[in-house]
Image (cartoon, coloured by chain):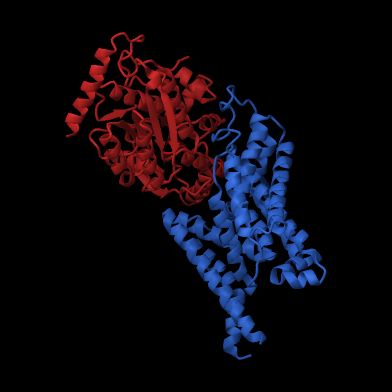
Chain colours: A red, B blue
């Protein structure tokens, strides 16, 4: 069923392309008339730097393509998000990006969109549909790259504290990397595990970390695979005066993270991150490839980058823009870039 | 009075304090590193911010009201101080004054909504809560504030948190030991003392209690009920703003947060406070002890590697027991009075 529907789609778009041979631009249909193409971004999470930057990437790539973008934001309301997909179907959009959400609530809605002949991609939510490619930022790689750096810096034998809250999908995937690293390196001892998502998260985690450091003064490595966790641990380390003794390894990055990592004597030595705006761009590009009838693969992974304190200091980087400028592999991902794809301006 | 009921009276009066001491002893034995001056001070530090907010809530509870907006006032003050220093490049003193004024204005608006427009307190402050959660994000389009951030209109923010401001959250004073007492703890103790003196020892405080127990009677006795109610919300707003300033100074950046956890934790502390010394009413001393009680439990549990959900469970259990104490007690008092 799905295969034939896909072939149908390819055939129709192919036919349109053949018909519109006089296209002014070198883009395949339907992008020869990009003003007629309408895509919708249906969001589950939107609060915070990461999601703001993701939206920025989506907007930039949509503008580069010249297509119309509608943003539907359910603000963590799973039922509303599902309704918004139906709304997008009713609006007659050509493509939908589902950004986060719950498998249970989005699976049926995504299927309805596919049934309506709409191209759909999903970012960081598994909608269990073969016709829908997954855009991922590879949380496992985020975790494992950070841990490789921790082992490179500290050897394979150390006493570590681990910050984790189970039940949050990206943290669960990063947790697999931690478990694997411990299995491969029996010298790594997890002496304490803690974590909370009570906001402000950094403040709550700082309170916990203070207790943990007090109870286990021999910890040398803290693995905090979420930047809010790392920020909290850093506050606790500073307050306990243990900055020289402890190294913090984390995931994600933002401008304020960069300044925290670069404070003199900061214990936060490395983080691994995918650029959220790049993930946003890749989401739109992948959707555009589907609309043009090209093969995208079932999962599109945006590779993460290791960012060390030393690198930030050597290049005197103080915000995300400078980080992008100094680290091309962070600023752009050569993912979902067929020849015809117009890219947002790169400086 | 027979010995049995005397024992029950003692239990109600001192039960919570005894429990607090027992917990401290237990954790000192079980959790390595729990006993010690730094650890004790740290417990104060971990509850300082929620404690300050709880003291504000106590004032609104005293006049028979309730303030749901304190958490968002605190996070708004966090964002405002960051915005003032990092984006507008103002001085620390200006930032602090701005935050305090903001807290007072929010309290004034809450009070006017409740007193003049007759909006029920829970609804008025709920509305204010949502309003502030949204408002604090508008200037930065939902981004957190840090030096070097890209501004919505292009360009980067060049200002920094001034070192003096950061000291409010990070400086530690020497007391017997070096670097022992963190600044927020001192602010917490001072605010607790001021509110305690105000509520227990001044005419105004007593009038506020009178308004809380019988608004009409207090009004007939000549108290300006409306003015005191508005004052209570303004105190609540200002203390919440102080909490937010300390939070900003500790975090060193303007973090997007709804502050709901701050609200819930501080309300819990104030309610636990009802049970302390068998007061059965909101009181500043009880609130401070209530906050400490939660702090001791959380610090001890974290040291013993208890996962986060057990901590919520324990918080809830303490609250339920405290409420049981309080309401069983007020029944007894009523029964005794007739």
Can residue A164 be seen from the camera position used here? no
- Residue A343 in the image, given as x and y percentages of width and height: 40, 16
Residue at the outermost right position: B222
Residue found at x 68% / y 65%:
B62
Work out whether residue A270 or residue A84 is closer to the camera in this orientation and state it: A84
Quarter of the figure with residue B197: bottom right
Where is B29 relative to B258, above or below? below
Quarter of the figure with residue A181: top left
Question: Where does the N terminus of chain B fall, quadrant-wise?
Answer: bottom right
Work out whether residue B162 or residue B183 is closer to the camera in this orientation and state it: B162
- Residue A227 falls left or right of residue B47: left
Quarter of the figure with residue B188: bottom right
Can residue B57 be seen from the camera position used here? yes
- Residue A63 in the image, given as x and y percentages of width and height: 44, 20
- Residue A82 falls left or right of residue A217: left
Question: Where does the C terminus of chain B fall, quadrant-wise?
Answer: bottom right
- Residue B55 in the image, given as x and y percentages of width and height: 66, 58
Residue found at x 67% / y 40%:
B167
Where is A106 relative to B322, above or below? above
Residue found at x 76% / y 68%:
B206
How many labels sit on residues?
A: 0
Work out whether residue B335 or residue A108 is closer to the camera in this orientation and state it: A108
Residue found at x 38% / y 38%:
A87
Where is A39 relative to A163, above or below? above
- Residue A161 in the image, given as x and y percentages of width and height: 42, 45
Where is B263 relative to B250, above or below? below
């Amino acid at each position: 069923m799905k295969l034939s529907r896909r072939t149908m789609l390819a055939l129709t778009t192919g036919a349109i392309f053949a018909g519109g041979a006089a296209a002014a631009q070198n883009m395949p249909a339907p992008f020869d008339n990009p003003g007629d193409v309408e895509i919708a971004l249906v969001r589950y999470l939107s609060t915070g730097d990461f999601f703001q930057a993701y939206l920025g990437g989506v907007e930039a790539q949509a503008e580069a393509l010249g297509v119309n973008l509608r943003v539907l934001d359910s603000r963590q309301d799973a039922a509303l998000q599902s309704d918004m997909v139906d709304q997008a179907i009713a609006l007659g959009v050509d493509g939908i990006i589902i950004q986060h959400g719950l498998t249970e609530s989005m699976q049926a809605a995504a299927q309805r969109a596919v049934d309506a002949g709409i191209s759909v991609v999903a970012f960081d939510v598994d909608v269990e549909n073969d016709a829908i490619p997954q855009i991922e930022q590879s949380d496992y790689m985020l975790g494992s790259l950070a841990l490789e750096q921790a082992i490179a810096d500290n050897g394979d034998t150390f006493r570590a504290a681990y910050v984790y809250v189970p039940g949050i999908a990206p943290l669960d995937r990063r947790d697999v990397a931690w478990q694997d690293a411990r299995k491969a390196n029996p010298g790594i001892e997890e002496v304490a595990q803690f974590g909370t998502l009570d906001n402000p998260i950094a403040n709550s985690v700082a309170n916990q970390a203070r207790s943990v450091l007090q109870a286990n003064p021999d910890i040398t490595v803290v693995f905090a695979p979420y930047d809010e966790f790392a920020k909290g641990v850093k506050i606790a380390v500073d307050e306990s005066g243990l900055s020289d003794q402890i190294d913090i390894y984390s995931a994600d990055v933002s401008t304020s993270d960069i300044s925290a990592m670069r404070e003199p004597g900061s214990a936060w030595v490395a983080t691994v991150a995918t650029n959220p705006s790049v993930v946003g761009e890749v989401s739109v590009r992948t959707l555009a490839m589907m609309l043009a009838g090209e093969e995208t693969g079932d999962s599109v992974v945006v590779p993460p980058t290791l960012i060390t304190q030393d690198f930030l200091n050597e290049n005197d980087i103080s915000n995300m823009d400078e980080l992008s400028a100094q680290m091309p592999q962070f600023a752009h991902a050569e993912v979902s870039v067929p020849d015809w794809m117009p890219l947002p301006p790169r400086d | 009075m027979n010995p049995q009921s005397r024992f029950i009276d003692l239990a109600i009066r001192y039960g919570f304090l005894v429990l607090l001491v027992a917990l401290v002893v237990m954790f000192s034995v079980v959790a390595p590193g729990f006993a010690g001056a730094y650890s004790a001070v740290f417990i104060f530090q971990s509850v300082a911010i929620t404690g300050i907010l709880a003291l504000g809530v106590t004032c609104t509870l005293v006049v028979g009201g309730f303030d749901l907006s304190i958490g968002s006032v605190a996070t708004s003050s966090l964002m405002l101080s960051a915005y003032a220093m990092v984006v507008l490049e103002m001085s620390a003193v200006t930032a602090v004054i701005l935050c305090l004024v903001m807290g007072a204005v929010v309290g004034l608006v809450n009070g006017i909504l409740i007193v003049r427009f007759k909006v029920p307190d829970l609804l008025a402050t709920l509305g204010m809560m949502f309003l502030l959660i949204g408002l604090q994000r508008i200037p930065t389009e939902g981004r957190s504030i840090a030096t070097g951030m890209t501004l919505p209109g292009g360009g980067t923010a060049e200002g920094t948190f001034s070192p003096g401001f950061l000291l409010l959250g990070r400086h530690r004073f020497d007391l017997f030991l070096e670097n022992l007492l963190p600044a927020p703890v001192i602010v917490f103790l001072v605010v607790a003392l001021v509110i305690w003196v105000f509520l227990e020892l001044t005419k105004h405080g007593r009038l506020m209690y009178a308004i809380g127990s019988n608004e009409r009677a207090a009004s007939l006795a000549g108290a300006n009920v409306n003015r005191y109610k508005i004052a209570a919300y303004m105190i609540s707003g200002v203390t919440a703003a102080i909490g937010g300033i300390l939070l900003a100074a500790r975090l060193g950046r303007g973090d997007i947060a709804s502050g709901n956890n701050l609200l819930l934790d501080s309300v819990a502390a104030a309610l636990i406070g009802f049970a302390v010394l068998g007061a059965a009413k909101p009181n500043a001393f009880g609130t401070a002890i209530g906050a400490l009680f939660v702090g001791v439990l959380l610090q001890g549990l974290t040291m013993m590697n208890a996962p986060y959900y057990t901590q919520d469970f324990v918080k809830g259990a303490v609250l339920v027991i405290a409420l049981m104490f309080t309401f069983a007690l007020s029944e007894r008092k009523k029964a005794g009075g007739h």
